[in-house]
């Protein structure tokens, strides 16, 4: 199966366990791999025969921006499920969502959660 990678999608959102995270917000980074058959598009050179990944980027940005979850795990699962539901051609998605500046004292790293979801029947 073929795979499209979209990396470095930056979004501002309001998911976080601390109350101030849901009020002040913070930056998130999203990387996604989308499995689908692109063989027809490789022959026709027509966007109608593949996935217009602008729509996936927009979907991700909108979900990060409008969601107010306590847990990053819920945000990641929601995005993965939405991609599979909205994108008919996508059979599997692997999604990593990171908080590059999590509000944790004396911690300069980033926190990331990765999920892989497969459309039923595949």
Image (cartoon, rainbow, N blue to C red):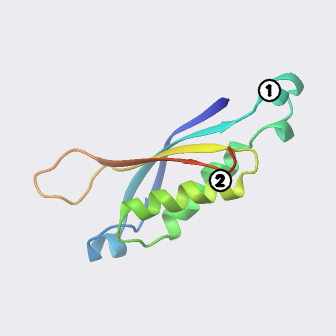
In the rendering, which numbered label is found on residue 3? Answer: none
- Residue 29: percent from the left, percent from the top? 43, 48
Mark sitting earlier along the chain (1/2):
1
| Position above or below: 78 against 50 | below
User: Quadrant location of the C terminus?
Assistant: top right
**Residue 40, located in which quarter of the rendered image?**
top right
- From what the image shows, is residue 107 above or below residue 48? below
Q: Which mark is residue 39?
A: 1
The residue sitting at 75% across, 33% down in the picture is 37
- The residue drawn where x is 69% and y is 48% is 121
The correct choice, above or below, for 5 with respect to 26 in the image is above
Q: Single out the residue that lies furthest toward the top.
A: 43
- Does residue 99 appear to the left or right of 46 in the view shown? left
Quadrant in the rendering for residue 20: bottom left
- Residue farthest along the right direction in this orientation: 44
Task: From the top left corner, tell me how far across and down residue 6 is, in percent.
Answer: 56, 38
Q: CA distance from mark 1 to mark 2?
A: 20 Å
Q: Secondary structure at mark 1?
A: helix
Q: Determine the image quadrant of residue 41.
A: top right
Q: Residues within 10 Å of mark 1 (few under 14, many from 20)?
A: few
Tell me if 95 is positioned left or right of 38 in this view. left
x and y, in percent, of residue 74 in the image: 43, 64
Q: Nearer the viewer, residue 89 or 54?
A: 89
**Residue neighbourhood size for the residue with mark 2, other residues' Cα within 10 Å, grouped as few (<14), some (14–19), many (≥20):** some
Return the residue at label 2. Answer: 84
Q: Are marks 1 and 2 in contact (CB under 8 Å)?
A: no
- Residue lying furthest front: 121
Q: Which element type, helix, strand or loop, lies under badge 2? A: helix
């Amino acid at each position: 199966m073929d795979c499209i990678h979209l990396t470095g999608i930056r979004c501002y959102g309001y998911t976080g366990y601390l109350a101030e995270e849901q009020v002040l917000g913070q930056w998130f980074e999203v990387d996604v791999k989308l499995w689908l058959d692109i063989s027809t598009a490789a022959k026709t050179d027509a966007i109608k025969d593949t996935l217009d990944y602008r729509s996936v980027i927009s979907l991700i940005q909108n979900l990060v921006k409008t969601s107010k979850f306590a847990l990053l795990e819920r945000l990641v699962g929601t995005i993965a499920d939405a991609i599979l539901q909205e994108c008919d051609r996508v059979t599997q998605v692997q999604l990593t969502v990171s908080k590059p500046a999590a509000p944790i004292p004396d911690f300069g790293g980033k926190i990331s959660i990765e999920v892989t979801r497969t459309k039923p029947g595949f």
